[in-house]
Image (tube, grey):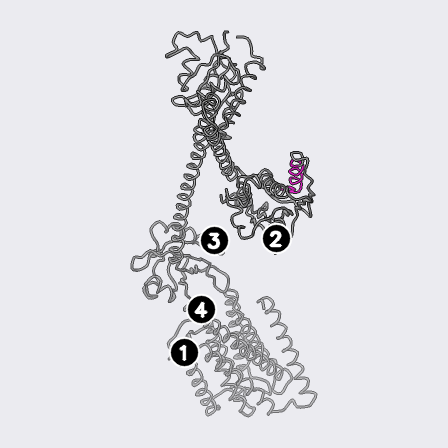
């Protein structure tokens, strides 16, 4: 299935593992591409660096974005995505530990589609991730291409 | 009295004298006493004595300055007249009798013309010598006449005054009128009122001399000018007595004035229009170090620093051109070269005719004040600097706390999530390989992680309360309380709580923060009455020492007053989680919110009899503005 992948931008391997597990538990079967930092995420999206030659027109269906990232931060990734005419329509869900008011405001200002705080309780986490997958991949109508 | 009014006044008095003299003549005629020699003697003696008295007064009371004024010259005339008339008075009616009178008036009128001479300061010898000489000369001449009367031409021819008598009397009249003109001219120049009296006197004396030719012994006209002269002299005497008392007052006033200037703590200097120092008081000597002798006569500019010379000249011009008063602060140079910070008041110096004849400068040393001002300035700057330092330190602490909170919020929760998540993964994926004890342990790990996550969230919430901006307004706390109660009722429909609000619950406070505080207080009341069948919560106010105190009272579990101090500390609990759920953050939050409203919060309780929480709110619209400016 083309264009049905999920880009997970997350530096903490524990969180990567738990998110993947939660997606699996929530029966989200889409391919998940993991970028460990913001730079790698941007390389993937624009087909540069280690992703040189990748067909950039194959865009992920959803981006799950952590904010505290090494190299290029989450907000910079968000800004680059929302400024790019080809990428700006991809839904970006901020998935982070922080619940700082200023982060939430800045996220929405830069065009984030959703802001989710990762709960400590894993059961709740699974529930949350399932809801995200269900909503953005199934319920929500995305434009073609 | 104004001089114009005085002229009218004097004219009036002279007219009265003319009339009274006429009336006196009429009385003599009426009582048939026209030939009374004793009356004539008394009249002439009185005139003489009065004339001598006036002369005496003038010399006696003006002797301090040894200044020979027009009035001193006039006094000489009065002395001569007095002495000759005295001889006239004691002579038997006859030729000599008339001659004494004629010569007396002639000498007197000639001396009156001496008022045309310059006024000048004379030696003490001359001051007393000239009048003494006049008196002695008059006496010797009178005695000479007394013993050599045979040489005199006859005063009468056929019962009428001889031609020589008439001619000499007319000369006297002429001289008296000349003197009157001289006084009138001086009055015109100086406007000193004394001149008016002397004009009157000389005109009157001139008139008597003029009337002489139309009179004969014991005749009404003859008597008339006698009375006229006595009246005039008598009036002048009265004037001089008054003048002298005024002069004394003036003199005392001048003494006081000069004493004030002399002993003033301020330096008082007078200068002429061109800037020459005229007077220099004791304080000026002390302040600048120059003695009066050194300073007087010098140009004032020697006190100035160079850059002030032109400025001062400008101020001086302004005053000379009619500005009334100028005050300024400047630096003047003392004799020892020291720069003095002074405040200078300049005012015009005027003579008795309001003409500006110079400037008065009152100079006050403000070096000490300036030094104190500078010190205050320095202290203020230091204080400002300190405030800035402290503010920076506070900002630093605040920023650090921000960073800490952020890292708590973000970084501390990730490991907890991993702990919980992987424990769950273990339970799910390997649960069949673990016995119940191992599974129980994993469950405990999960619950501990979750609890810690909760604590972190509470901590963050607590710190957020104190950091969010306050936007206070006038709000009804009762309304907020009822909203909270209806929400609690919705959540626990099985509970029956009797909730009442009493009295006016409006307050000037931040609605969001007060919502959180009341949520906790009412929430607690709700929670701790849960085991009581007839739960009641009351929200009201009482007045205590003029202060509005809010209270929330319940009839629930209550608490032991021994632990009251622990109530408002974070994470302190008086009940176990099993009894009542909670994390011990609620009242700590209430405490902080009330503190931010400059209020106090306290509690009373008794186990199983309920608790009452009291709080005050110290904000008002005006105090709020004030505290905002400070923070």
Q: Earlier in the sequence, mark 1 or mark 4?
A: 1
What secondary structure is marked by label 3? loop
Q: Mark 3 points at which residue?
A: B321
Q: Nearer the viewer, mark 3 or mark 1?
A: 3
Please tell me whether residue A16 is drawn above or below residue B497 in the rendered image: above
Using the rendered image, report if marks 3 and 4 lie on a common chain.
yes
Relative horizontal placement of residue B299, taking residue B593 as reference (left or right)? left
**Whole-percent x and y of residue B110?**
48, 77
Number of other residues with Cα within 10 Å of mark 4, as a class: few under 14, some 14 to 19, many 20 or more: few
* Pick the front one: B91 or B39: B39
From the image, tell me which residue sits under label 1: B127
CB contact under 8 Å: marks 1 and 4: no
Q: Point out the stretch of residues depicted in magenta.
A: B474-488
Q: Mark 4 points at which residue?
A: B260
Looking at the picture, how far across and down is residue B467, in whole percent?
Answer: 50, 38
Residue of label 2: B547
For label 1, the crowd category at 10 Å Cα-Cα, with few meaning under 14, some 14 to 19 and many 20 or more, is: some
Callout in the foreground (4, 2): 2
Mark 2 or mark 1, whichever is nearer to me: 2
Q: For mark 1, give the secondary structure.
A: helix
């Amino acid at each position: 299935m083309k264009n049905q992948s999920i880009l997970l931008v997350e530096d903490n391997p524990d969180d990567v593992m738990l998110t993947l597990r939660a997606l699996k538990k929530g029966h989200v079967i889409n391919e998940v591409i993991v970028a460990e930092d913001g730079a790698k995420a941007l390389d993937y999206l624009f087909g540069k660096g280690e992703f040189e030659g990748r067909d950039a027109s194959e865009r992920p269906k959803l981006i799950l974005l952590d904010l505290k990232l090494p190299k290029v931060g989450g907000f910079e990734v968000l800004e680059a995505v929302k400024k790019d005419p080809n990428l700006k329509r991809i839904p970006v869900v901020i998935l982070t530990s922080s619940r700082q008011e200023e982060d939430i405001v800045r996220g929405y200002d830069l065009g984030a589609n959703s802001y989710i705080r990762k709960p400590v309780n894993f059961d709740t986490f699974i529930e949350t991730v399932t809801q995200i997958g269900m909503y953005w991949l199934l319920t929500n109508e995305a434009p073609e291409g | 009295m104004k001089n114009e009014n005085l002229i009218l006044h004097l004219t009036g008095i002279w007219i009265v004298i003319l009339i009274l003299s006429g009336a006196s003549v009429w009385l003599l005629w009426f009582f048939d006493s026209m030939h009374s020699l004793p009356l004539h003697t008394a009249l002439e003696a009185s005139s003489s004595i009065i004339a001598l008295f006036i002369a005496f007064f003038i010399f006696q009371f003006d002797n301090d300055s040894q200044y020979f004024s027009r009035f001193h010259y006039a006094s000489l005339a009065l002395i001569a007249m007095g002495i000759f008339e005295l001889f006239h008075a004691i002579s038997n009616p006859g030729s000599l009798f008339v001659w004494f009178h004629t010569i007396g008036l002639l000498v007197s009128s000639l001396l009156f013309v001496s008022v045309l001479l310059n006024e000048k300061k004379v030696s003490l010898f001359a001051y007393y010598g000239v009048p003494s000489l006049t008196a002695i000369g008059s006496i010797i001449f009178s005695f000479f006449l007394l013993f050599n009367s045979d040489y005199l031409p006859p005063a009468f021819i056929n019962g009428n005054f001889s031609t020589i008598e008439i001619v000499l009397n007319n000369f006297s009249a002429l001289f008296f009128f000349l003197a009157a003109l001289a006084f009138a001219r001086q009055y015109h120049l100086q406007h000193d009122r004394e001149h008016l009296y002397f004009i009157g006197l000389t005109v009157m004396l001139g008139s008597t001399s003029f009337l002489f030719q139309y009179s004969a012994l014991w005749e009404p006209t003859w008597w008339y000018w006698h009375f006229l002269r006595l009246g005039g002299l008598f009036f002048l005497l009265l004037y001089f007595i008054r003048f002298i008392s005024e002069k004394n007052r003036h003199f005392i006033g001048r003494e006081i004035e000069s004493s004030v200037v002399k002993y003033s703590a301020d330096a008082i200097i007078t200068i002429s229009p061109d800037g020459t120092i005229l007077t220099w008081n004791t304080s000026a000597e002390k302040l600048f170090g120059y003695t009066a002798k050194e300073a007087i006569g010098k140009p004032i500019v020697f006190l100035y620093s160079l850059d002030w010379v032109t400025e001062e000249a400008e101020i001086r011009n302004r005053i000379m051109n009619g500005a009334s008063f100028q005050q300024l602060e400047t630096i003047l140079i003392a004799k020892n070269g020291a720069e003095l910070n002074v405040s200078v008041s300049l005012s015009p110096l005027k003579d008795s005719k309001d003409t500006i004849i110079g400037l008065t400068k009152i100079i006050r040393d403000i070096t000490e004040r300036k030094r104190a001002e500078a010190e205050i300035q320095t202290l203020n700057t230091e204080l400002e600097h300190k405030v800035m330092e402290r503010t920076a330190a506070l900002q630093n602490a605040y920023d650090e706390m921000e960073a800490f909170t952020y890292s708590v919020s973000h970084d501390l929760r990730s490991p907890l999530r991993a702990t919980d998540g992987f424990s769950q993964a273990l339970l799910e994926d390997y649960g069949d390989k673990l016995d119940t004890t191992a599974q129980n342990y994993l469950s405990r790990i999960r619950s501990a992680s979750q609890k810690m996550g909760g604590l972190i969230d509470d901590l963050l919430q607590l710190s957020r309360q104190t950091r969010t901006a306050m936007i206070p307004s006038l709000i009804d706390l009762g309304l907020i309380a009822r909203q909270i109660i209806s929400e609690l009722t919705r959540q626990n429909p099985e509970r029956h709580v009797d909730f009442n609000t009493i009295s006016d619950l409006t307050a000037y406070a931040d609605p969001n923060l007060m919502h959180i505080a009341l949520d906790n207080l009412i929430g607690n009341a709700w929670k701790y009455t849960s085991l009581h069948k007839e739960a009641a919560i009351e929200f009201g106010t009482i007045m205590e020492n003029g202060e509005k105190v809010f209270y929330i009272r319940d009839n629930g579990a209550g608490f032991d007053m021994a632990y009251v101090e622990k109530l408002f500390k974070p994470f302190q609990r008086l009940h176990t989680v099993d009894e009542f759920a909670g994390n011990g953050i609620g009242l700590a939050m209430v405490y902080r919110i009330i503190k931010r409203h400059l209020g106090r919060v306290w509690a009373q309780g008794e186990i199983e009899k309920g608790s009452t929480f009291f709080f005050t709110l110290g904000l008002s619209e005006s105090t709020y503005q004030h505290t905002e400016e400070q923070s």
